[in-house]
């Protein structure tokens, strides 16, 4: 789960990491003290380049720009809030992040003196400009470890202590809040020697919900509580499967035959008739859906439950083209139900996908 | 996993734990004890239940454990198994927090204990039994090693192999999470040395780079590897069901994996039905 910048900065503050003075708002403002930066609170990447970060010197200018931002969308995401902050007297911009390294299986601290820019670009062009430090999660992380890393990278003495302190607090946050990513880009060193997180990205691990209070975050509150995994895509053929890998493979085969998946929907293991019904209804909620591909490899799932769910929903959607492939537990019962209701059924993924595409082309 | 594997089931008294203990016993697995704290003294399908791993190991000389405990209790249970002297731990549980997995995987490495998972269907060897939940009826004794990040997709491909006359030596699910204890690169050398295995079918998916890392070994592997990668049609930045199945900042695309695998000499197929065809070409039978 991604946090908004203003939420990430609230957390930084709680952990004692310096952030620019500012506030989040959905309205006009009354006064400013000096020049400000106004930042659209959206979760899409590349916000700056898309016009989501603007500057203002007077209240009038600020309000004009706030109003414009609040009435706009950035890369398809509607702007509902803006963050208004002091404009920092920037001396240097650094890059700092902590990620989960999947290969080394350790937390990885990334630091670069090339901050404020696209870090992937730096990684491609000047990989030597990025310092990597793998943390042993079984040991306590201490500030000296960060100081050594920064010193080895040639940072000036007066900056080392302050930045190491930020890294130490960031790591503490990363562990305690069950984050999977914490990023500050840029980490600004100001003319007067402050070290400030000018931006903030935090991704939290939703699997830790049982020990964290995530209800304070927008994304979590907005979340629909669905009894299956659903990802919306931009095509027009719904794809339903049981198990993530199988559902992905089902999407791929639709694409392979020239179709375009409208969603990834994994009903999981042991889904009841009711869950199948809700799943199919969810897919058909969108108006542009032309067909649905359903692929079930039943273990603890039962084909007859799935078939009954499908039949129930299709009663109300007689025009939608559906192709089903299912096998495993209670296969015969399931097939019988589908057959009696005239729903096309095939015995292999490939045949079922091809059949659907052919039906749609007719 | 072999004839000497003597396993315990942690979380044996739960619904899943109890059901799958029965299944594991039915296919010949030596399940010697179960552990559920607070429920010592009971029996589940004839298997004695203990309060601690320590007791179970002392009384039954167990060397492996399968975990069905709820996600919040997994880290505690894995540490208990490692400290109790277990050598192979299979974590079936899904939704274990990543920070907990980081800890237990690193602790396992430090103590020389192999952890498989979390979020895995486990391992199965039709000849000796299974640790986990892979349905026995989708496998058949044979000479293909299977290794996969997925559950039902593995069953699908196992089924495709079996109907085309290919059985399995061992089938290993490595798990769909961001961090897993055992990766492709750890499993491939075992298959390469295994006398029962003639070829390996590797089932990857988008996210991370464990397929690319495995290529280092595939290059020097003596047995053929047939690879299938799921998620070629998945967009960037979206988590596709599995916690680990996400393309982030350009890392983890199906294209990257397919390219690396081809360069390393693996046979990469786009359709599941091509797998037995390729096997016929490269190993015959």
Image: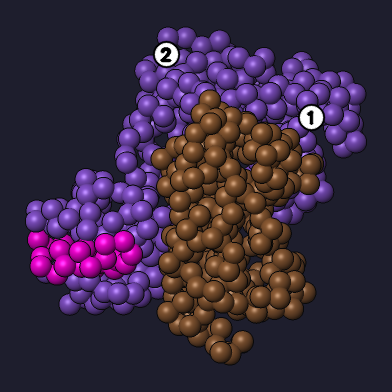
Q: Nearer the viewer, residue A224 or B249?
A: A224
Q: Is residue A327 magenta?
A: yes
Which secondary structure lies at badge 1? loop
Q: Residue at x 55, y 18 (%)?
A: A10
Identify the subunit bearing mark 1: A
- Identify the magenta region: A317-341
Asked if the residue at tag 1 contacts the one at tag 2, i.e. Cβ–Cβ closer than 8 Å, the answer is no
Q: Residue at x 22, y 58 (%)?
A: A304
- Residue A42: percent from the left, percent from the top? 45, 34
Q: Colour of chain A?
A: purple
- According to the image, label 2 marks what residue? A29
Residue B127, numbered label: none
- According to the image, label 1 marks what residue? A139
Chain identifier, brown in the render: B
Q: Judge whether A359 appears above or below A69 on screen.
A: below
Identify the subunit bearing mark 2: A
With B55 as the anchor, is A355 left or right in this view? left
Give the CA distance from mark 2 to mark 1: 47 Å
């Amino acid at each position: 789960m991604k946090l908004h910048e203003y939420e990430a900065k609230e957390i930084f503050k709680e952990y004692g990491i310096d952030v620019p003075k500012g506030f989040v708002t959905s309205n006009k403002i009354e006064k400013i003290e000096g020049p400000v930066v106004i930042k659209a609170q959206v979760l899409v990447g590349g916000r700056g380049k898309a016009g989501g970060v603007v500057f203002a010197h007077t209240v009038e200018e600020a309000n004009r720009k706030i109003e414009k931002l609040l009435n706009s969308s950035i890369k398809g995401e509607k702007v509902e809030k803006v963050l208004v902050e002091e404009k920092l007297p920037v001396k240097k911009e650094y890059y700092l992040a902590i990620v989960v390294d999947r290969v080394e299986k350790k937390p990885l601290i990334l630091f670069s003196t090339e901050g404020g820019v696209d870090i992937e670009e730096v990684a491609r062009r000047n990989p030597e400009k990025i310092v990597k430090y793998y943390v042993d999660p079984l040991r306590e992380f201490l500030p000296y470890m960060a100081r050594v890393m920064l010193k080895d990278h040639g940072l000036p003495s007066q900056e080392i202590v302050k930045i190491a302190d930020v890294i130490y607090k960031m790591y503490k946050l990363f562990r305690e809040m069950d984050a999977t990513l914490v990023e500050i880009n840029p980490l600004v060193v100001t003319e007067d020697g402050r070290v400030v997180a000018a931006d903030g990205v935090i991704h939290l691990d939703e699997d830790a919900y049982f020990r964290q209070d995530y209800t304070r975050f927008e994304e979590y509150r907005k979340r629909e509580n669905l009894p299956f995994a659903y990802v919306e895509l931009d095509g027009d053929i719904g794809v339903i499967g049981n198990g993530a890998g199988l559902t992905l493979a089902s999407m791929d085969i639709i694409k392979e035959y020239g179709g375009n998946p409208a969603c990834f929907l994994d009903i999981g293991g042991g889904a009841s008739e009711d869950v199948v019904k809700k799943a199919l209804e969810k897919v058909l909620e969108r108006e542009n859906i032309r067909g649905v591909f359903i692929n079930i490899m039943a273990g603890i799932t039962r084909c007859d439950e799935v078939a009954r769910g499908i039949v129930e929903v299709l009663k109300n959607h007689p025009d939608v083209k559906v192709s089903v492939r299912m096998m495993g537990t209670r296969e015969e019962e399931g097939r019988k139900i589908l057959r009696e209701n005239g729903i096309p059924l095939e015995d292999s993924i490939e045949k079922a996908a091809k059949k659907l595409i052919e039906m749609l082309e007719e | 996993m072999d004839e000497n594997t003597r396993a315990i089931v942690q979380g044996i008294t739960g619904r899943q734990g109890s059901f799958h203990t029965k299944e594991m016993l039915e296919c010949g697995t030596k399940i010697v004890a179960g552990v559920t704290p607070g429920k010592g003294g009971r029996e589940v399908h004839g298997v004695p239940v203990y309060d601690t791993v320590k007791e179970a190991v002392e009384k039954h000389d167990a060397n492996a454990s399968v975990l069905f405990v709820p996600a919040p209790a997994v880290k505690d249970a894995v540490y208990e198994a490692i400290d109790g002297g277990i050598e192979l731990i299979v974590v079936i549980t899904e939704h274990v927090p990543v920070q907990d997995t980081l800890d237990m995987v690193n602790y396992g490495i430090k103590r020389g204990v192999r952890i498989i998972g979390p979020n895995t269907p486990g391992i199965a060897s039709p000849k000796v039994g299974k640790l986990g939940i892979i349905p026995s009826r989708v496998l058949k004794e044979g000479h293909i090693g299977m290794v996969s990040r997925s559950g039902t997709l593995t069953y699908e491909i196992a089924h495709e192999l079996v109907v085309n006359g290919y059985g399995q030596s061992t089938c290993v699910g490595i798990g769909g999470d961001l961090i897993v204890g055992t990766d492709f690169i750890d499993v491939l050398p075992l298959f390469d040395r295994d006398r029962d295995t003639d070829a390996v079918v590797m089932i990857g998916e988008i996210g991370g780079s464990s397929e690319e890392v495995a290529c280092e070994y595939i290059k020097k592997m003596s047995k053929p590897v047939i690879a299938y990668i799921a998620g070629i049609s998945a967009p960037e930045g979206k988590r596709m069901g599995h916690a680990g199945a996400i393309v982030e900042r350009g890392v983890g695309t199906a294209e990257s994996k397919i390219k690396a695998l081809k360069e390393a000499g693996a046979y990469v197929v786009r359709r599941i039905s091509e797998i037995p065809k390729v096997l016929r070409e490269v190993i015959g039978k």
